Image (tube, rainbow, N blue to C red):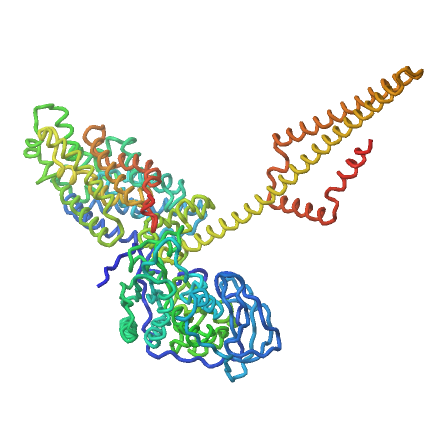
Amino acid sequence: MLQLFKFKGGVKPQTNKAQSVTEPIGIAPLPSRLFVPLHQSIGGTPRPLVAAGERVLKGQLIGAADGWISSAVHAPTSGSVRAVAEHIAAHPSGLTTLSVEIEPDGKDEWVERQPIDYAAMAPEAVRERLREAGVVGLGGAVFPTHGKLSASKTVAMDELVINGAECEPFITCDDLLMRERADDMIRGVGIFRDLLQPKRVLIGIEDNKPEAVAALSAAVARLGEKFEVVAVPTRYPAGGAKQLIRVLTGKEVPSTKRSTDLGVQCFNVATAYTAWRAIAHGEPVVSRIVTLTGNVERPRNWEALIGTPLSEFVALGGAKADTNGYLMGGPMMGFEMPAMDAPLIKATNCIIAGSPTLFPPKAPEMPCIRCGECAKVCPHELQPFEMYWFARAKNFGKTQEYKVFDCIECGCCSFVCPSRIPLVQYFRFAKSEIWAREKEKNAADSAKARFDWKTARDEREKAEKAEKLAKAAAAQAAKKAAEAAAAAAAATGGEATPAAASAASGDAPVDAEAVKKAAIAAAMARAKAQREAALPKNTDHLTPAQQKDIAEVDARRHEAGIESAPEAGPAAEEMKP
Amino acid sequence: MDFSTPPYLLKNASVQRVMLQVMAALVPGIAAYVWIFGPVILVQLAIATAAALAGEAAMLKLRDKPQSMFLADGSAVVTAWLIALTFPPLSPWWLVVTGTLFAIVIAKHLYGGLGQNPFNPAMVAFAVCIVSFPALMSQWPAVGLKIDFADQLGIVFGTFPRVDALSGATPLDTLKTALKLEEGQFSVAALLANQDVFGFFAGRGWEWVTGGYLIGGLWLWQRGIISWHAPIAFIAGLSLLSGALWLYNPSQFANPLFHLFSGGAMLGAFFIVTDPVSGCTTPKGKLIFGFAAGTLAYLIRVFGGYPDGVAFAVLLLNICAPLIDRYTQPAIFGMKDAS
């Protein structure tokens, strides 16, 4: 029996999972339209490969991964591309995102699928294949899976953790997947195991899902694997990657490190399933299992196509009359879908129809009484009330001191707060402010560096010119003196000696003066440069906006080719003696 | 459905529920109080409550804050009850009102209201009144004093003369005075045996009241409203010092049990040093806060000029709380090896 560890904190909200597990996974009918966003994973936005009017087949690549951390996007069914245009995103902001609109033709005709035997392939090729198949973390973070399948070069891989905890209330899509598609899921875990070569494979499932535990144990035995299927105590957020890793291995992954640095890596069960489908069946990720629950007549899990508009999906469940909104994700970390035509995406594990009875309006926010409940339940052992205090005061440096970036936004603190303070919102606010400032500061720093460099270069050039001038004048004078001397020498013994002497003596002083002048000019230029380097310039403390303006002006000048012209002109003239 | 921010599920918790539970936890102590000293304490509780709510309402209006939400949060009532329970039960009504208004208006609202007060308002009230009205604040009814309820009310409202019989001292005071006056003549043991202010192991009657606070405090701990750190540390601080001195010279110093169950020790341990707003919030900080408060309370109570030291000890520690918190921040998830 595996020794389990505990993570501190956590809460036990009502699970509300029983409603949606009575029916098997249903296959959602083809919707009338699909809106497939190109950007569905962490990392680069895939480039669209299709244009309006084109016919696409199910599984056809429509967005190519852009960069290594990026993941491809495919047509969820066959049909014609209506548009490649901005469409409302499944995001609380209500912003739009570049999406491929497809009108299904009803045939659901696949492209030619190419199953591969990954055992015969190099690991890089397998990772590339997963990237091309659009396999991303389906637990909600949608991090490209291939990017997590390289072990640390220095630390041996001890454990591969497979996350079937599904700790958020209401959500049952992983539960049903494990019950019904255990074999393929376990085979997918096999791929991850082969790529990472861990010493142990641990599959963690909250102990409120005994059917899933049984199904996976049976599948593991059937397939002759040595994976350990472990029931972990039900306590939100046991399904947080860091929490599950802690419970199963005792390791705490700090925010400053990657889990592979500690010899452990974690994947969601649905990710393992899609990885197997991609490798062994050549099927890219074009659908996923989505729980439809909450205030609906028929709560159930559906295998729905990516891009299905929310309105058509919720029609499957029959929303009750008092439904007043839809959540994507769970009630702890989810968000309200911004519109009914926002699409289901790879990150959509659950849609909850909300009602005033299901999620009653929150009572007004009260002042913090520092009761410390939030600190008690924080799974990362932070002091949320202190961070709140400083975030409220916009003292963001202090929020960082209190480790705001270790906050995983699980919502436990807000859940228990007797003053009903939306703590997580304050921490998101602090984080985004800090990010924005850092960005601004970086921009300002590079603008300042550019500006300083340019000023220094100008000064240097001026000094160099002056010195050159001095040298040229000196050379000229020397030459003239030499000529005069030569002339004098030539005239030696001649009658014109006084004239030559007078010419030499007359010319020489003039040239000496020019040398002196040039030397003085050079010294002055050097002194000026030194002075300017020492004194603060009025350009030292510019606002980012001003610096941006300056940078733009410089750029324009540079483009127009006038940057050096005003200096070149007089300098060139000066050069003429 | 409130879609503004996740989480959309919230635990059924509110400031009001917290405060109601604190009030409920005071009930056993209050019941014993009534049993021993008569129902006049209920009148004092009512006076303090009324004054607190009036002060709160006035300040909320001045500060342009929502009235009903804050009046119903129960924090002012808890402050009022703690004041009534720490003042002598036959204090004149205006003394209780003065203390309560000072607590609510000055100690609470002038610092920003609920959650913002650096000092425990009830302890501020006690400190202000004992400094300003030392005689009245030291008049504790002798146990067994038979005055009927009507006369008690008369005393509180000034229609009945404050007879000498009232000016009994607390057991703590009696002990201190006797030991000071009759230096070397009386031993603690002899005093405890002879004087009728002393009961089985602490002040007569007070044993029951403080025992009631202990029961209420344990219930609060069991409910998760308070953590064990500050009360245990307070009790440890008080016991360690009193125990050491008692072992050193049992005829000069009372035993720890006497100290724990006399004066404001139990109320302080479970209801005062546990105040989250003015106290420490980190586990280590709570331990330091509680231990230092217990030690200081003993020093002030035994060697200082006041009959009890809990209020001053707590106020002094309130000043230190932010600093203590600053330096006792616990290591966070994944960072324990580093620190």
Q: Residue at x 29, y 66 (%)?
A: A206
Question: In this rendering, is residue B308 above or below A553?
Answer: above
Q: Position of residue A210 (x, y in %)?
A: 27, 71
- A386 or A131: nearer the eye? A131
Residue lying at the far front in this picture: please name it: A493
Q: Which one is in front, B329 or B223?
A: B329
Left or right of A393, for residue A227: left
Which residue is most to the right?
A495
Label tally: 0
- Quadrant of the rendering where the C terminus of chain B is positioned: top left
Residue A411, above or below B95: below
A224, above or below B106, in the image: below
Image quadrant containing the N terminus of chain B: bottom left
Q: Position of residue B278 (x, y in %)?
A: 33, 42
Where residue A110 sits: x, y (%)? Answer: 50, 80
In this rendering, would A217 be left or right of A403?
Answer: left
Determine if residue A168 is in view.
yes
Q: Residue at x 88, y 19 (%)?
A: A503
Can you tell which quarter of the image residue B310 is in?
Answer: top left
Most foreground residue, A67 or A118: A118
Out of A341 and A454, give the one closest to the viewer: A454
